[in-house]
Amino acid sequence: MKNRLIVVVFLSLFSALSWASSSAVLDHMEPNLADKASLQKGAKTYINYCFGCHSTKYARYERIADDLGIPHDQFMDNLVFSDAKIGELMHIAMPEKSAKAWFGATPPDLTLVTRLRGVDWMYSYLRAFYQDASRPWGVNNKIFPDVGMPHVLYELQGTQILDCTGNHNDSSHETCADLKLVEGSGALSAEQYDEVVYDLVNFLHYMGDPSREQREALGIKVLIFIFIFFIAAWFLNREFWRDIH
Ligand code: HEC
């Protein structure tokens, strides 16, 4: 029993350390759930570019429309392309078996992906595709080496290449770290592309925990209540003990 405990502690320490070391190369982003415009743009990018392969089957269209402040009819016209009803869960039509045959791996459900990977990982991953002729889709990824997913935002970002200058001894993916954008190869500038990815990851962050904003707002109200109650209780306590001392 004791040995098992030691192994568990050791393994969790080890995994914490490996997460810490792998996060060293990640770019940071600060999600903002109050920015409804960002969440709406993110939802649009998600539906247009990701939802063909990835489901978000633990979320309902209706909840998203309500939380993001999009009227139901507008949401159905612009963001639901199947015959799904607004109250339905966000399933996709692609059968898992065919997806595995096409891509070598089944595209995982993305409802909770930011909870698992973290927003920094997602933000970095979607900006880390680069040209690699040896891979089936002609691209590889610095954050997720040999990933089975094509660079679906390619038309927006354009071509990135691994820039190995200054590092000729070792051209492995990890050490040959820097990516260079071929100017003008995508529809957007680097800053605009970062913004699109920011909004998308912001939306997926919301999706991973849709009640976070309400919960945090409620938490502040509860703390204010406890504070006011404490003052009242303190005066009451003083009043009670006044005649005894
Ligand atoms: C053409 C199909 C396709 C589209 C479209 C697509 N993906 Fe993927 N995605 C995949 C496949 C296949 C994998 C599994 C890759 C692997 O495990 O090697 C994957 C994996 C991922 C992963 C890694 C998940 C994990 O934890 O292992 C993330 C994150 C992801 N996709 C996000 C996105 C986002 C965001 C979009 C939209 C911008 C998107 N994908 C669009 C096919 C797709």
Image: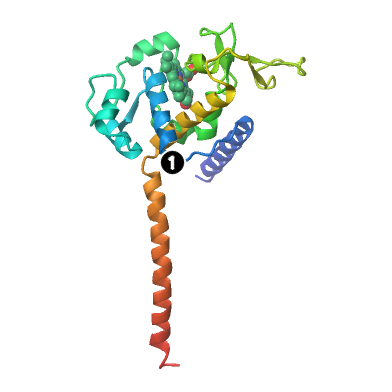
Residue 167, above or below 2: above
Closer to the camera, 65 or 116?
65
Residue 112, above or below 189: below
Looking at the image, residue 171 sits to the left or right of residue 87; the answer is right
| Residue 89 visible in this rendered orientation of the protein | no
Amino acid type, mark 1: Leu
Query: Within 10 angstroms of label 1, few (less than 14), some, or many (20 or more) residues?
Result: some
Closer to the camera, 93 or 83?
83
Q: Is mark 1 on a helix, strand or loop?
A: loop
Quadrant of the displayed image that contains ligand 1:
top left
Please tell me in which quadrant of the rendered image residue 25 appears.
top right
Tell me where residue 245 appears, x and y as whole percent: 45, 93
Residue 222, above or below 43: below
Circle 1 sits on which residue? Answer: 33
- What residue do we see at 29% from left, 31% from top? 61
Tell me where residue 94 appears, x and y as whole percent: 32, 15
Closer to the camera, 135 or 13?
135
Tell me where residue 200 appears, x and y as whole percent: 45, 29
Looking at the image, residue 176 sits to the left or right of residue 230; the answer is right
Closer to the camera, 184 or 127?
184
Query: Is the image coloured rainbow, by chain, by secondary structure, or in one colour?
Result: rainbow
- What residue do we see at 37% from left, 48% from top? 214
| Residue 34 visible in this rendered orientation of the protein | yes
Please tell me in which quadrant of the rendered image residue 39 appears.
top left
Tell me where residue 79 appears, x and y as whole percent: 32, 24
- What residue do we see at 41% from left, 50% from top? 216
- What residue do we see at 75% from left, 16% from top? 165
Looking at the image, residue 154 sits to the left or right of residue 216; the answer is right
* Disc 1: residue Cβ within 8 A of ligand 1's nearest atom: no
User: How many numbered tags mark residues here?
Assistant: 1
